[in-house]
Amino acid sequence: MTDPRDPAPPRRLSILGATGSIGTSTLDLVQRHPERWTVVAVTANGNATALARTARAVGAELAVVADPAAYADLKAALAGSGIEAAAGPSAVIEAAARSTDIVVSAIVGAAGLAPSLAALAATRIVALANKETLVCAGNLFMREAARREVTVLPVDSEHNAIFQALETRNMAAVAEIILTASGGPFRTTPLERMAALRPEDALKHPNWSMGRKVTIDSATLMNKGLELIEAHHLFGVGLDRLGVLVHPQSVIHGLVRYSDGSLLAELGSPDMRTPIGYCLDWPVRRPTPVAPLDLAALGQLTFEKPDRLRFPCLALAEAALAEGRGQPCVLNAANEIAVENYLAGRIGYTDIAVTVEMTLDRAIATGAVADPGSLEEATRLDDLARRIAAEVVTTRIR
């Protein structure tokens, strides 16, 4: 394998979740400089047509759809290309385990956990965009990454900002790590209107272009809660040194406050190609097509504390992090089920937080909420939480 600190191209790269928003932004950067990359594998959930188009465009060695029913379409779309086709969850894991220099893990949801873990065995760098990997099994993942001497680079704009501003030699002097949140589309919506908010309204994010599930999480601020849990595992700090600040302009992505009074921040346009490019070329910085940030044109930056009455999902995530054990895993599973049902029109907007809270209470009552020590334990806890959450949703519908 190429030394990850050697900037000489090409690097061998796999992209898990290649047809999602992170995947397509990654591919945009790769296609601008194809001489730097050898694309090993690309995966998608079930969009065979888009995946085949992507695989052909970058000359991938392997293309995999997680949905076995999409295999025939993928095989047909790749006919004559020489690109290997495969399907099924196990095939995605096998793709993740192919030898590379860097794996971009951008599968949405808990489905990304097993491939992210598999990637640790065959790469030097995991550029992690799948937050559920750390939320569901953060201790397990980071312990395995350390054992295998794999560098974990955060792709999320907030954690990437912290990674850049964090002086690891001065970790003892870190007083607070602050993640910023735009506040989403409902930052100023009257509380009495929240229950009636429709999915089409929640999907109108004011600054970022993201997938449907992540956009809903941004509206509820669950996204920020999950990111607090991520930050705990990535940077080794507790909730007492983690904070959230609402920053509607989405220009400052993260801040680190030091005990000497210094506050370091990373600023940039709300374009995911900046943190993705940072990860792809780390430790070297190279130009990206992102427009430079014009502070004079922007005029002002504003900040406010998050309203936990308006955003109960943030408070639930903070409590899960404080309690530890397997509660973050349960939180994530319950949220995925709740968001899925909200997008389908089966429950209301405020039912998302209610579903998560009720699921946590019922799961804890079973006595089975322990910190996962293996992929199998994480999967069992995730399955338990999803069953409970589905039952809660059914009672809400009735």
Image (cartoon, grey):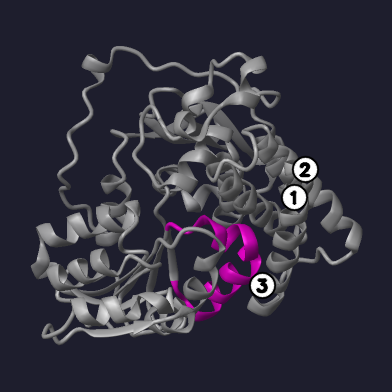
Q: Mark 1 sits on what residue?
A: 394
> Toward the viewer: 297 or 315?
315
The magenta stretch is 129-150
Q: Are marks 2 and 1 in contact (CB under 8 Å)?
A: yes
Residue 144 vs residue 42: left or right?
A: right
Q: Distance of mark 2 from mark 1, alpha carbons?
A: 6 Å
Q: Nearer the viewer, mark 3 or mark 1?
A: 1
In magenta segment, residue 148: yes
Find numbered disc 1 in the image and state the secondary structure of the residue it sits on. helix
Q: Are marks 3 and 2 in contact (CB under 8 Å)?
A: no
Q: Mark 2 sits on what residue?
A: 398
Residue 386 vs residue 24: left or right?
A: right
Q: Are marks 3 and 1 in contact (CB under 8 Å)?
A: no
Q: Quadrant of residue 258?
A: top right
Name the N-terminal-most of marks 3 and 1: 3
Q: For residue 376, say whether it is visible.
A: yes
Q: Mark 3 sits on what residue?
A: 379
Which amino acid is tagged 3?
Answer: Thr
x and y, in percent, of residue 176 in the image: 59, 37
Q: For residue 256, say whether it is visible.
A: no
Name the N-terminal-most of marks 3 and 2: 3
